[in-house]
Amino acid sequence: MASADLVGSPGEEERKHTVVRTSELTKRYGSETVVDRLGVTVRRGEIYGFLGLNGAGKSTTMKMLLDLARPTAGGVTVFGLGLAANRARILPRIGSLIESPSYYGHLTGEENLEIVRILKKLPQAEIDRVLGVVRLTENRRKPVRNYSLGMKQRLGLAMALMGSPELLILDEPTNGLDPSGIQEIRDLIVRLPSRFGMTVLVSSHLLSEVEQMADTVGIIDQGRLLYEGALRDFRDRGWLRIAVADSASAASVLRRAGWRVTTASEGELALPLHPDEQIARVVRILVGAGTQLYRVEVRRRTLEEVFLQITGEASDEKPVPA
Ligand SMILES: Nc1ncnc2c1ncn2[C@@H]1O[C@H](COP(=O)(O)OP(=O)(O)OP(=O)(O)O)[C@@H](O)[C@H]1O
């Protein structure tokens, strides 16, 4: 049975809203499982941040989405079509930048794009368009070997944008760039859905980066999907930090009253975030028990804290109540 057959038959809704869906997607190299029954869903018009430490399986997954690696098991649906049986219909609608861009250093940016243009049978004007999008118009006649790393990466992005693909798959596009290069690439990516109606799947091992670009995040570790959801949901979750003179006795006062409390550090309590009325109750209980209360603050979780918690590396100094 072809692996695509494992993917459920896509309905009209699926076609409309879902651009990529993987089902039980698995890749093994020898005895090593590098992608493990992965089920991700990328929706139309969103920027999906694929986040994981180095070696988590991001590149391998992206290669399977582009038919550059064959799944050991499971399937991939793109634009509502099973990839295994519909490569010729799907792949021309995807642009990609996997690892570092391939270009000829002795040719100019324009000449490199000309090669892609001929391969994809696109009109001449497409070169001008993508050069404009990535802001390389002024440097179009320079040999690429004289480009900065950031310019080379923008050229790679321009190549991926040739022909206005509906889906763009970018593997660590800011890797190795300096802060201004990172900013440039990030700004370009963020605007793609609204400017061109594109859907973007972008991987990163940098939490701060995903946080600044993505609508949805998928966290992968050792080939497994640990979390998939709106980035907003992470930010909205948080906890209360209460600074008191004696945290041990204040914690036992609250626990006796039925509250879930952890001692964040000497002199500090941490509670899950509650609505304001409940915070007022907590304060009343503490003050009523004679606690010296110095400060009550709401702390939002950073993506990094969420990530550390999910990957089981959270330290005890950073309690993250559910
Ligand atoms: N062709 C291959 N043969 C054998 N093992 C491979 C192959 N490609 C990748 N791997 C292994 O699969 C695992 C996942 O690699 P992958 O490149 O997908 O991770 P990643 O999350 O993209 O990380 P990175 O950002 O470091 O590329 C790694 O342990 C890697 O060594």
Image: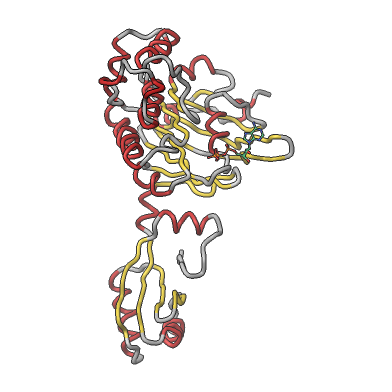
How far across and how far down the image is residue 61, in percent? 55, 34
Horizontal side of residue 32 vs 23, given as left or right: right
When the figure is inspected, residue 37 is found, relative to residue 71, above or below; the finding is: below
- Pick the quarter of the image with the N terminus: top right
* Quarter of the rendering containing residue 149: top left
Q: Residue at x 29, y 11 (%)?
A: 125
* Quarter of the rendering containing residue 312: bottom right
Q: Residue at x 42, y 34 (%)?
A: 173
Q: Residue at x 54, y 27 (%)?
A: 9
Horizontal side of residue 279 vs 121, given as left or right: left
When the figure is inspected, residue 148 is found, relative to residue 176, above or below; the finding is: above
Task: Say which of 283 and 184 sits in front.
Answer: 184
How far across and how far down the image is residue 263, in percent? 46, 77
When the figure is inspected, residue 67 is found, relative to residue 24, above or below; the finding is: above
How far across and how far down the image is residue 77, in percent? 52, 28
How far across and how far down the image is residue 176, in percent? 44, 38
Task: Say which of 49 and 181 sits in front.
Answer: 181
**Residue farthest right in this picture:** 31
